Amino acid sequence: MSNTPTTTVSAVRKMGAADVLDTIANLSNDEVFTPPKLANQVLDLLPKHVWSDSSLKFLDPCVKTGVFLREIVKRLMVGLKDEFPDVVERREHILRNQIYGIAITELTALMSRRTVYCSSDATREPNPDFPENCYSAVKFDEPEGNIAFPLVGHNWPEKKGIIAPSTSCAVCGAKYSDFTGDDREGMENYAYPFIHMDIQEIFGEMQFDVVIGNPPYQIGKNSADKNNAARSIYQCFVEKGDSLRPRYLSFIIPSRWMNGGRDEVSTVRDVVFGSGKTRHLVDHRFEGDIFPGVKVPGGVCYFLLDRQYTGGFEYTYHSAEFTGSVSNVENPSQNFYRDPRSSSIINKVKSKCIDSMNTVVSSQKPYGLRNNFPAQPGRLHNSVEVITSSGIEYADADLIRDPMSNLCKYKIFLSKTTSENGGKINSDGARRLFSRIIVGEPNQVCSETYLAIGSYDEENSANNMMQFLRTRFVRYLAGCRIDTQNISKDKFDLIPLLDMSRSWCDAELFEFFDLSIEEIELICSTIKEMP
């Protein structure tokens, strides 16, 4: 047997179509392994000249299987052939001087070193007595080589020297109670080094030219308790990656940041939309297209930011039934419309109506009642009827807030969760979005299960609003903004606020807004009738 170690390139060639990195199960829906096909699609966004530049340094700050680094090595081995004719010298230069990674767990550190160096120990040399054993393609002085996994902890703020169980990490938002206790001994703490440490502590004084990867999406428990639910973390990687000022920045992340929402998405919007440096944004509406078997509500996207570029970006959208691209997208507004086909419909609505429905939709907890409010055993002299997820209950009137001044009026109660997970398309190719819509009577309120909409003196007006919300037209416009399971008032900003003294049906709305046959077919093919 030759003493030349099996390189990453030749190993992949020998495997042919069967790539072991296609077969590895994901750690979770939050830490998703990147299929080699997807990794190459992301790398294809980079300009070709990077593969023939021996001075560039590539960093994957969230290494899992090592697929990005492996595919980068393959491309550099081809691109640097003229500069380094000797394959051993070329491999040595690439692995020692150009390829760097930071693992997210100890397991992924070992896995990625095995992928890139052909050995989980980068100091391992050939053993003549056991020639079949793996050894490092390039011998380093330390076992980790250039794929680091330094031990680091969360940043738990203290008060008078005490860390409360409800304390959250100042860096990533992880809950102290989720990562402490006897049952956690010896387990990963998921304090990802890239965002919890200064990069100079890991690699010293070094400027990375390309930062690329697929970061963890959430951290914490997927709990029904919103105070202990999983928290988005991908935006921390985007922000930290951008702060390194690489020439090129590219990440695979959830798409839900595009339509606003929680505060953390503003970080991503500022980097991708606000920098003016983005060249490409590729959006997959349904994550199953690229991550089979993985649930990421709202879909997945990836982008390429070029520090030396200024101008519009190319946006490519993929859904189950449509793929389309828009060139030279500049200064995206607060409301970025993911499906390019929706723009003409939205523009027609905006040109005819100034006011939108978000002005008559409540915030969460419309009347100040959580789902676990102290319900009374029955109707008492000071009771208010409450519509809850389990039916009608009663609450003390002193607990009720009325910020919309519609307590004594008719209104609409709309379930704040979609009928599908994030409006996901069903097997019939369409989605429903809204689930329960009911008319709230005077002196009737709802728990946080619902949003409250409108304030009407006449029951007929409330009924008209209910029928309006049931139309495909309205639900299509809402669907342009809804990417997750929860519905909030900001998702109604594309829906026109119309006169509810009259009723509206789809045919009347299509005519009122002068929709084309193609636009009507789009709405009817993507939104199904409500039962």
Image (tube, grey):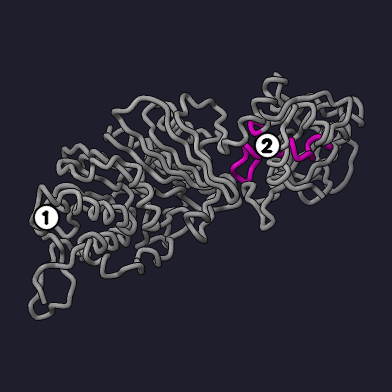
> Residue 92: which numbered mark, if any?
1
User: Residue at 47% of width from left, 24% of height from top?
Assistant: 331
Q: Amino acid at mark 1?
A: Glu
Where is the N terminus found, in terms of image quarters? bottom left
128, 15: nearer the viewer: 15
Bounds of the magenta segment: 466-491
Q: Residue 489: which numbered mark, if any?
A: none
Rendering coords of residue 397 (x, y %) = 81, 33
Query: Regarding mark 1 in the picture, which secondary structure is present there?
Result: helix
Please tell me in which quadrant of the rendered image residue 369 appears. Answer: top right
Q: Residue furthest front?
A: 517
Q: Amino acid at mark 2?
A: Ala
Mark 2, residue position: 478
Depicted 143 relative to depicted 494: above or below: below
Q: Can residue 372 be seen in this snapshot?
A: no
Residue 56 in the image: x percent, y percent?
A: 19, 41
